[in-house]
Amino acid sequence: MSSRVEEISVDQIERNPMNPRIFFESSKMELLKNSIAEVGVLVPITVYRDVNKRKFILIDGERRWRCCIELERPTIPAIIIPEPDPETNLLSMFSIHHLREKWSLIATALKLEQLMNMMKIEDSKELATLTGMPTRTVNRCKILLSYHRKYLDLLLTTDKNEIKPDFFMELYPILQSIPNTVPNLLKKYEKEYVIDKLLEKYRNKKIYPAREFRKINILLEEVSNKKISQKIAETFFNKLITDYDSTIDNLMMQLEIEYLTGIDQTIQICNSLTKLLSQITEEDIKENKKFINSLKQLNKEIDRLITYFSNIRS
């Protein structure tokens, strides 16, 4: 059966259950609706016929379809294709929607999980090839999926400006390190209790994970290197978790954890950054101008310090 274009009733169409996108930007929807009101639907949507439901299922064009419903247009032009198998349907969602207009990271992660279960694939590079996503994005999705389902639901249902996936990304290496560096902490508190308390502080702007969680990582590295005792680290976490008003910086000052500032801190960050940069491939970068500009700024400061060091040694 080949593809064909027909005018079909908007009432005969259902959204694709494989598409995780729930929210549509209102300003863009309004522009599209005005355009359709003036000139009609210029680009047909793509659907397949579900024989069991006696409905057409969307592959591409949900916004156009929604606008037609609001405008009370009875029909919409559609390219009708043969029904895909579930795996092909889901891969179509990645290739059409994720790459054209990015899904949120949590939506991408949940669909990736579905794909992994369907196709029994775990390898990040293979998943990247299948979905067209960078390997780094696949790995970020896997990190999110390592958390309890309640946190994934929280990311789906909460305003994106209140809780961002970056909180969980920055927290992940800390949670991975704690069992080896501060094992008594998880004997005293459940892991989810620790996450909940830190999340509460984050929501109340008591901590800023993008910069402050990295200080905790450095603290844990120093515990591993036996430059600081487990007891001090335990005290730090106990106060951070139980004292509502305590902040990461204040606790480090109280406990006189001074080695986390200045040159020593920079050394730790440089080591971590070097490791991260070594994992980035040309495929990950592509034409990411923001990333390239950041590297140029970093390179400028590195050159400045190396030049200074060379001058004082000569």
Image (tube, rainbow, N blue to C red):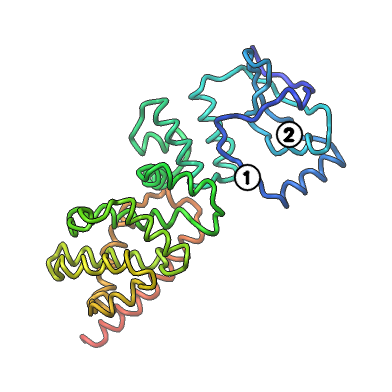
Single out the residue that lies furthest toward the right: 38
- Mark number, residue 23: 1
- Mark number, residue 180: none
Q: CA distance from mark 1 to mark 2?
A: 14 Å
In the displayed structure, 181 sits above or below 144; it is below
Q: Is residue 125 left or right of residue 2?
A: left
Residue drawn at the location 52% of the way across and 29% of the way down: 90
Density class for disc 2 (Cα within 10 Å; few <14, some 14-19, many ≥20) is many
- Mark number, residue 65: 2
Q: Are marks 1 and 2 in contact (CB under 8 Å)?
A: no
Q: Is residue 195 left or right of residue 112?
A: left
- Amino acid type shown at disc 1: Phe
- Amino acid type shown at disc 2: Trp
Single out the residue that lies furthest toward the left: 226
Q: Is residue 201 left or right of residue 53?
A: left
In the displayed structure, 119 sits above or below 28; it is above
Q: Earlier in the sequence, mark 1 or mark 2?
A: 1
Q: Nearer the viewer, residue 14 or 121?
A: 14
Residue 265, image x and y in percent?
27, 73
Residue 17, image x and y in percent?
57, 29
In the displayed structure, 66 sits above or below 301; it is above
